[in-house]
Amino acid sequence: MSRPPLPRRVTVVEVGPRDGLQNEAAQVPTPTKIAFVEALAASGLPVVELTAFVSPARVPQMADAVDVARGVARRPGTRYSALVPNLRGLAAAHDAGMTEIAVFAAASETFSQRNINQTIEGSFTVYAQVMRDAGVMGMRVRAYLSTAFGCPFEGQVPQARVVELTERLLTMGAFEVAVSDTIGVATPGQVADMVDLLRARVPAGVIALHLHDTRGTALANVLAALQAGITTFDASAGGLGGCPFAPGAAGNLSTEDLLYMLHGLGIETGVDLDAVVRASQLIGPSLGHSLPSRYLQAASSVSPR
Ligand code: HMG
Ligand code: MG
């Protein structure tokens, strides 16, 4: 398939307050989370995923979802989203003022079971209901498809299965599918092939890539995806992140590292990189460890003149 030139503009979806924090051992105070979200939105990031309306017993860090969602002062022009696994989560998100949510399915059975205690088909039945009810309430629904490039339990995942499930999520009503490398195993050729297969069936504009950087391939994968026509990428401030139910899942692609590369390529994002660094520096002290973002480390070690 012939490939388009690099896009002039890219949408960066910030998932740090959700994917970034969900795996952190130290309970981050709710006001600190709210300040983190507000700092990220102030940087110009167009979409910020605030939290997850999931079982607090399974993900204790997200137990304050309602307070975070209610507490964040909304910035005009910024979209705010949150994970929702079922109708109960949808109701809670709606009550907390959310107008956009994200459901999260998987492309491998074992991960689906471990993550949400559902078969893939069972989760699609639930998500069809969530999308229908969300539509009635005027809420937009994004969808994730985890383990699209490999599963921590089953290994390789057939690309045809990823394409089929992505199409089904879009047909059910998702406005976008974040095709997700949950454990950071993807390599650039695999990403380019997957994007080509997806683009043969659906418009590039409804596909986002959600990359974890476990093996250092995330930025190379972004470049491959840009060359293949993708214009929406998830990232996490400071490179925080990981899924508690995916052994070996390390941090997300760092927002700072992504912005540095995109801006260097002359691609517009509308985001102030220095302001994202300040947001990461705001959350860092609550976590008890340094943040993995390479750009952040470089920026933090250079003393201002
Ligand atoms: P279940 O395990 O089937 O059990 O839940 P349940 O339905 O019997 O519920 C268990 C308990 O959770 C009950 O409480 C429910 O009331 C409660 P109890 O009676 O024991 O006190 N509950 C809820 N509480 C709050 N909000 C809700 C809710 N639903 C039930 N919405 C469920 C199923 C999906 C809820 C559960 O398994 C769960 O919360 N799992 C956590 C999933 C999760 O957050 N995973 C991490 C995010 S996904 C990810 O990181 C991947 C992604 O980044 C993309 C990628 O990188 O691949 C998106
Ligand atoms: Mg993730």
Image (tube, helix red, strand yellow):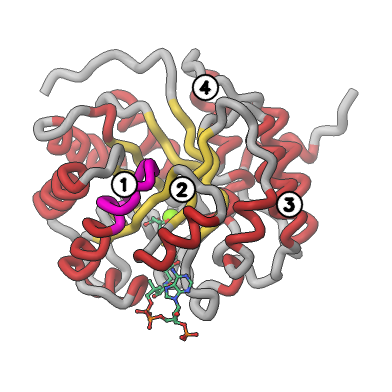
Front label number (1 vs 2): 1
Label 1 Cα crowd, 10 Å radius (few <14 / some 14-19 / many 20+): few
Q: Between residue 191 and residue 235, name the one nearer to us.
A: 235
Residue 143: within the magenta?
yes
Amino acid at pointer 3 = Ile
Q: Dots 4 and 2: beta carbons under 8 Å?
A: no
Q: Residue at x 61, y 44 (%)?
A: 237
Question: How far is disc 1 from disc 2 in space, using C-alphas?
Answer: 42 Å
Count all numbered tags in the image, as a single digit.
Answer: 4
Residue 297: tell me if it is visible: no
Q: Residue at x 22, y 60 (%)?
A: 107
Amino acid at pointer 2 = Gly
Horizontal side of 107 relative to 272 (left or right) equals left
Return the residue at label 1: 136
Task: Name the disc covering residue 283, or none.
Answer: 3
Which of marks 1 and 4 precedes in the sequence? 1
- Tell me the SS state at disc 1: helix
Front label number (4 vs 1): 1
